[in-house]
Image (cartoon, rainbow, N blue to C red):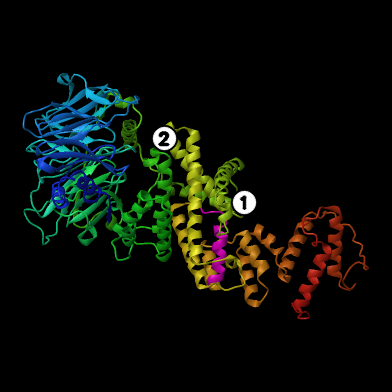
Amino acid sequence: MLRLTHTFNISTDVLTSIVAKEETVRRSKACAGVADTRIHNVERDGGVVYSWRGASGTTRVGKYDPHTKQNKLLYTFDKQVCISSCSLNKEETLLASKCLTLLIEIHPINNTKVLKAVDCKVKVQFLYLHTSRSVPLESHLLLAADDGYVDQYHILLVKQEGYRVVMQNPERLVKDRVAEEFCWAQWDSVPQRLYYLTCREKHVLKCVQFFPDRNFETVFELPLDLPSNLFTSARFVNFGHDHYQEKKNEGLNMVVFTDRSGTMCVCYSHPLCTQKESTYTIAFVHRGFSKTYTVALEQTATSGSTVNLQPLFIHLGYYIVVYLADHFLHLINCRQQDLLCHSLFLSGADAHVDAIGADSVILSVPGRRLLDVHTGRIYTTDLSHDFLLQLLSSSRPEAQRLAALHCMLVHLGPDQDLEQKIISWISENVMSFDAFDQIQEFILASLYRICYQQSLSLDKVLPYSSVFEKKDLPVALTAIPGVKCTPELLAQPVIKGKARSLQGYWEELHCVIERLKYFEAVPNPRYRTTQIKSEWTKLLAAMKSDKKKSPNHLRHLEENTKKVLSMVDTWRLDKRVVPLFQEEDQQQRALVGLMVDKLREHLNKHLPRLGKKKIDTLVVNYVAKLLELVRHMLESVWLKLNLGSSVLCLKQQGSAEDWAMFHVMCRILEATEGLCLPLPPGYSTLLTVLGVRCLPRHTFLQYVDHGFLQLTDPFVSRLMTDLDNSDGNEELKFSVLKRLPECMDQRVCQLWDHPISSACISREYVRRLLEKYSKTRGSVQLDRDNTCFKPEFLPLTYLAGILTDTEQQAPNPFEEQENVDARFVEETALKQTLMKLGLEDK
């Protein structure tokens, strides 16, 4: 599940360099010295600071540069010393080391300044601040002691002889008190923040932000309800690793994770009460609540008092991984926490991570990487695509399948190869599951990912899962076997000082918290696609009846649709495979326009600060992406089945591949109708063409009667012109004609070369023409030379005369059809009569 890829290995990346530097010692002895090589810190720039036991009892400090893949010797102690903390400044001119807490000049090696001589646990860390100077003349060092305080030293530097960089007045270093009376502290090197936990009357989490102008400020405070006496001594996170004093299982394991999108999660484990369960809490600060999970542990062969039962927390951005080796892996969605089913819980063999064992000591390092202290390896972390795809198997619980699908679509996307595999899986498992509809989930989750990347503000207003459209959620999606979840509201965090006026993370977090207050106060802030269902039902009924909606309303919807289709039409015109977007489809065009209207209205109501112009762009893009997403699904299945233009040929019976395509399209139609989502124009025609080719005739007509298949103009035209008038085809055409609305019926008759259609045309022609006939009946002169009938066939001859006379007085109602006139009526009437008498073949 969790895929670790090592980017640094002390055995291969450092060993060769150390052997070269210890040239006075035999290779075997040098290799023996490597066994004592220890990583002390990973700086913000990715540089790895390490030490090793050198020749003649020395201790040396070096740095590995991941960009150049080179090692550099920084400093050599002339005796063996125990380095418990070490940090290198950005310019590589100063080295801070905790053996007596020394500040050492190393460019070149010169003065040494003792910062703290008392033997206690001390952490040192240089700041890596952005500065406008090309050569900074000042470095800043944090010194954190387990006495419960953090000081910042301001170290002025000066150049001598053009290249030497030394401390200016090292005996009088200026320092500021940053924090005090803390029991836990965490350094966040990328944004240059210090988090610490005070416990005077109650626990309060505070954050100090360091600025490029050497200033710092406490910008964040959050009261936390934590058990008392959590730590026997101060705990430090992300200050490197102390190989001599730090022990495992000392108090709780606590860490803070943040993301540029404005999320903040405080993760901590609870003191162990029993080895039968593990309890941990994730405080979703950006959501205003926390969730405490209690997991029942299975008894394993390795279970025992010496085994670490404190879970490891790993940040993956959209997710937080809670991992307890040999027991479970919990992939927690830190943005969408409404339901447990959008997080993934694994146990047993599924939860195993090869590189992390029960006795591993794992630290977080900059760049969301992990350091294994014992093996000296640094890993990047990611989720395994292949494993997530395996979780879609029908043997898996539906909650796992939904969580895996959502993870791949939102967290791992966009990945074209992965998306193709998901669509292939959908086409092979096309029937809806009991707990959720996989096609609906694919559409909504994909759209959410696309639009959320464009504007983070859409997080709370756009739908991201189809399960919220259900009236009653299945039990399978509301609980995880063996896991108890207890939610609790958090105290209101305080963002203060410069953070209120800063851009970037603090601005985004402040906006997220403020939006949260608003969204909690208003009903239904998240848009639900089914909200337009009642409006769509009314509009559809009006379109089918003689009473149309107001022209202005329909014109407004059509303008919305034109905006959407103008965007769709610019995408991949030369690569289209499926024949869509090639015809007028009034129903789908109206639904497209209606969806744009309602979604725009919803966003204007809840996110007015975005502005109407941006909202209009976001909405049009959302609906356009929806249509394109459906087209992409169809195209993927179309190519997989190796279909061609012959699909549109009605003369051929449908193949197995045609049937498979028809089945997939039926399910897409069912899924989109369930969410009241529009389909690309042309979809209904293509589906009906496949239906008439694949289904038995009586089943096809049942699909039509139930409204599942639409008798569109292009389909009916193709049916009348492509099929001959054999008995079976004639029966089908008559059945279709009976089901057409009157306005469409007359147009279709013009296309079908058949006596019955000619009769229909004639009757309609006569009816319309006689409506114009003057009530004052004049005499009709029969021109026997121009009639095709015998004189004694007086009724027909008389009618033909009336029609001819009326044609001269009134416009021809069928003037667009050149061959429809009185003579046409005569000929049709004669043919019909002869057929009735059995005197002429059809």
Q: Nearer the viewer, residue 109 or 337?
A: 109
Q: How many marks?
A: 2
Q: Position of residue 377 (x, y in %)?
A: 22, 49
Question: Which residue position is annotated with label 2?
Answer: 607
Q: Nearer the viewer, residue 30 or 625?
A: 30
Query: Residue 329: within the magenta?
Result: no
Q: Sequence order check: which comes first, mark 1 or mark 2?
A: 1
For the C terminus, give its image quadrant. Answer: bottom right
Q: Nearer the viewer, residue 781 or 744?
A: 744
The residue type indicated by label 1 comes to Asp
User: Magenta residues: mostly which secondary structure?
Assistant: helix
Q: Residues within 10 Å of mark 1 (few under 14, many from 20)?
A: few
Q: Position of residue 185 (x, y in %)?
A: 17, 34
The residue shown at (17%, 57%) is 326
Residue lying furthest front: 24
For the N terminus, give its image quadrant. Answer: bottom left
Give the CA distance from mark 1 to mark 2: 39 Å
Query: Residue 684: within the magenta?
Result: yes
Q: Residues within 10 Å of mark 2 (few under 14, many from 20)?
A: some
Q: Which mark is residue 803?
A: none
Q: Position of residue 178 (x, y in %)?
A: 18, 25
Question: Which residue position is annotated with label 1?
Answer: 546
Taking 186 as reference, is 397 above or below it?
below
Q: Position of residue 316 (x, y in %)?
A: 29, 46
**What range is drawn magenta here?**
678-695
Mark 2: which secondary structure? Answer: loop
The residue type indicated by label 2 comes to Leu
483 horizontally vs 638: left or right: left
Taking 708 as reference, is 260 above or below it?
above
